[in-house]
Amino acid sequence: MKIAMLTNNYKPFVGGVPISIERLSDELRKLGHEVTVFAPDYGQQEEDGVVRFQVTQRKMENGMVYPRLYSKEIRRNFHEKSFDCIHVHQPMFVGTEALHLGKKYGIPIIYTYHTRYEDYLHYIPIFRETEDSGMWRRGLIRLAKEKIVPGYMKWFTNQCDMVLAPTAGMQARIRKNGTVVPMAVMPTGLADEFYREDPQRTREIRRKYLGANEKMHLFCSVSRLEEEKNPVFLLKGIQRLKEKLPEDFKVLLLGEGSMRPKLEELAEKLCLDTTVIFMGNVPNEEVKHYLRASELFLFASKSETQGIVIQEAMAAGNPVIAIKASGVEDVVKNGVNGYMTTEDVEEWSDKAAELLHSGVYHNMKEQAEQSASLYKASRLALYAEQLYAQCIKTKREEEMEYGEKSNGEENTAESILRIFKVS
């Protein structure tokens, strides 16, 4: 198959969507398919299988770019090549481009619902709520979250041939919002190397951050440092955990974002400046080593659709302490491979302390690794292959049925015209 992947963000931007696209594309190519990823131009070198399109000069606070509504690079490639299907990863910008191209060339459009966009409205200034926001702005924000965004998503998804949800919980949420087209659950897969440990690299990381203190713990968290990831709660939870654990520990915080200066200031205020280590962006291929070197994965985000980093942490044998939210509750089995709590600092820190000292840690560690085995990218690529083939087959049958129907209507019209001519 010749598959076109359309996305508004891709590497070198660090995030769940670029990781998901890269892994799926790589595994599909291993199966013999031709995959072309259409992604924004960040000014980097050319890469096989990736076509970069021009973007506007404006950027969001988190570093994401704004693609142009019309892309001559995408349209030229579609004119020159013959794609079998389109897999689009956002509903805006490349989303509307995908709808146009799908209709023009008569090929199916598959959309993966990666993001709950109502949780990201604060990136648009007019929808950013502050202490000074009046009733008018608060009402506008509420209208956008409850009506405008869900309404657009309902419309967009129903223009596609199939919608892929990363979890069963998200699928139910999308159905409830009014999506009626065929759907399937397909999470992001983990590359095989996430299941393999490099003992030497693990020892190096632990030695670097813990020294020779064998009683000290090492924990990890992976997240963009942005409001929707709830990093302020994470720091407050770590502070309470520090007060409850008899042993000392350090937390490696992997990720970058606009809130970093504020969070570093807060960490110092909470006396965490030697406990929490802000690592910044870490290359994807290195993340697994930091996870392997850690004993717990700490998470506070409430805006996940599937929690890729949670799956990665579990593959590395990390039980998870997280806030109960969509995306998280589909991966974390409470009391089995980790704990989910309400957004309460006391409860969250209690569960982290309990996990380490109740005697269930090693069992939870094994269960975490077992849970992650379900997310192997090679296995999920085979499933994606089947879904694409199904969509292509259905689309061709619909085109044939439409063609026969159109011919029948034309024949009827010609017969009526002959009657009038005769008369």
Image (spheres, rainbow, N blue to C red):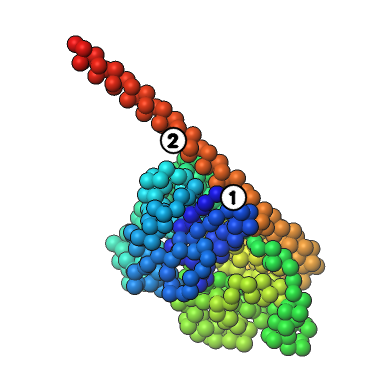
Pick whichever, 237 or 78, lies toward us.
78
Residue at image position (41%, 54%) is 80
Dot 1 amino acid type: Ala
Pick whichever, 234 or 79, lies toward us.
79
Q: Most extreme residue toward the top, as rendered?
A: 423
For the residues marked 1 and 2, what is the alpha-carbon distance in whole angstroms? Answer: 23 Å
Residue 176: image location, x then y, percent: 48, 44
Q: Could you classify mark 1 by the number of other residues whose Cα lies within 10 Å: few (under 14), some (14-19), or many (20 or more)? A: some
Residue 387: image location, x then y, percent: 57, 45
Residue 188 visible in the current orientation: no
Pick whichever, 359 or 290, lies toward us.
290
Find numbered disc 2 in the image and state the secondary structure of the residue it sits on. Answer: helix
Find numbered disc 1 in the image and state the secondary structure of the residue it sits on. Answer: helix
Residue at image position (53%, 85%) is 269
Dot 2 amino acid type: Glu
Instruction: Determine which quarter of the picture holds residue 60.
Output: bottom left
**Side (left or right) of 374 relative to 19:** right
Residue indicated by mark 1: 384
Q: Could you classify mark 2 by the number of other residues whose Cα lies within 10 Å: few (under 14), some (14-19), or many (20 or more)? A: some
Residue 363: image location, x then y, percent: 79, 63
Residue 380: image location, x then y, percent: 63, 53
Residue indicated by mark 2: 399
